[in-house]
Amino acid sequence: MGLCRFCGKPAGFLRKEHRECREKHNSGVFIIRSMVADSLSNSVDRDEILKIARESYISNEELKNLILNGLDEAIDKALGDNILTQEEEEKIKIVLLKFGFGVDELSSSKTYEKFIKALILRDILEGKIPKRLDIKGVLPFNLLKNETPIWLFNDVKYYQLKTYRHYVGGSNGFSIRITKGVYYRMGDFRGYPVEETELTKVDEGVMCITDKHIYFGGRIKSFRISYDKIVSFTPYSDGIGIQRDSTNARPEYFITNDGWFTYNLVVNLANRG
Ligand SMILES: [Zn+2]
């Protein structure tokens, strides 16, 4: 006789769960997730959530994942029209605090990473140099004095266009007029990946974004580009394309797997001052 994986009581011959228990569990998951996803409009009632979790056989670990998933939804919703406001930031922090998330749990969370990215973009849009990056290990390049590293992308693929040719009808990305200090919505980045067939993969490595340069450090190539040497940026869902200010410079592409953040970050840094 197997035991129910939810309530722990005998579940019957060759059975691992009671149907009612599973349904109760699933509905608890749904309710908690929705409550947290709504936490920027309605404050989250911790006791209520803990009660639902208990009654729905949701373990502590599962609950924490659910809360992060719900927050992810809340952050996406907020980033759909604008960058996170101070008020929204506080509300998210309160939820994380209420459920006792530790530094380790957060540093490995994609949701928390997105949250920090949004705060970094807000800093830049407000004219501040963000200091939210804590680099562990040694960078494969030397930063200049008075230069602040703002973000580090790992496992970035670096491509160049196979043969140089002048664009007649534009590029594969979508075009955005550059204005000072503008946030480009998350939804704008859906479905415009870099078209890799046209490109040569040159290298793979680390890309560091500072307040003054874009650095790339790979196995074969390492370089630094000053923002004022870039004439155009092309947004993609998975990265960014740049064109350097030189007659025979080929378009270059960096696949960071987060076009929304890369584009907002780099374009707003380039337009500063
Ligand atoms: Zn059961």
Image (cartoon, helix red, strand yellow):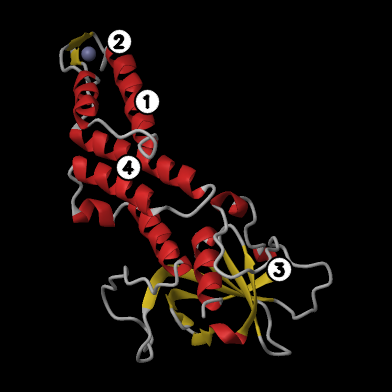
**Can you identify the residue that label 3 sits on?**
198
The residue at which mark 4 appears reads as 68
First in sequence, mark 1 or 2: give its number.
2
- Badge 1 is on which residue? 30
Q: CA distance from mark 1 to mark 3?
A: 44 Å
Camera sees residue 203:
no
Labels 4 and 1 touching (C-beta < 8 A): no
- Disc nearer the start of the sequence (4/1): 1
Return the disc, 2 or 3, that comes first in the chain's sequence: 2
Residue picked out by circle 2: 20
Residue 1 occupies quadrant: top left
At 67% from the left and 77% from the top, the residue drawn is 251
Viewed as shown, does residue 56 lie left or right of 193? left
Instruction: Report the residue that reaches farthest toward the right.
Output: 168
- Amino acid type at circle 1 is Phe
Q: Which residue is depicted at the point 68% across and 66% down?
A: 177
Amino acid carrying label 2: it is Glu
Q: Quadrant of ligand 1?
A: top left
Circle 2/circle 4 CB separation < 8 Å: no
State which mark lies toward you, 1 or 2: 1
Q: Is residue 156 visible?
A: yes
Q: Secondary structure at mark 1?
A: helix
Q: Earlier in the sequence, mark 2 or mark 4?
A: 2
Do the numbered discs 1 and 3 sit on residues whose CB atoms are within 8 Å?
no
Mark found first going from the N terminus, 1 or 3? 1
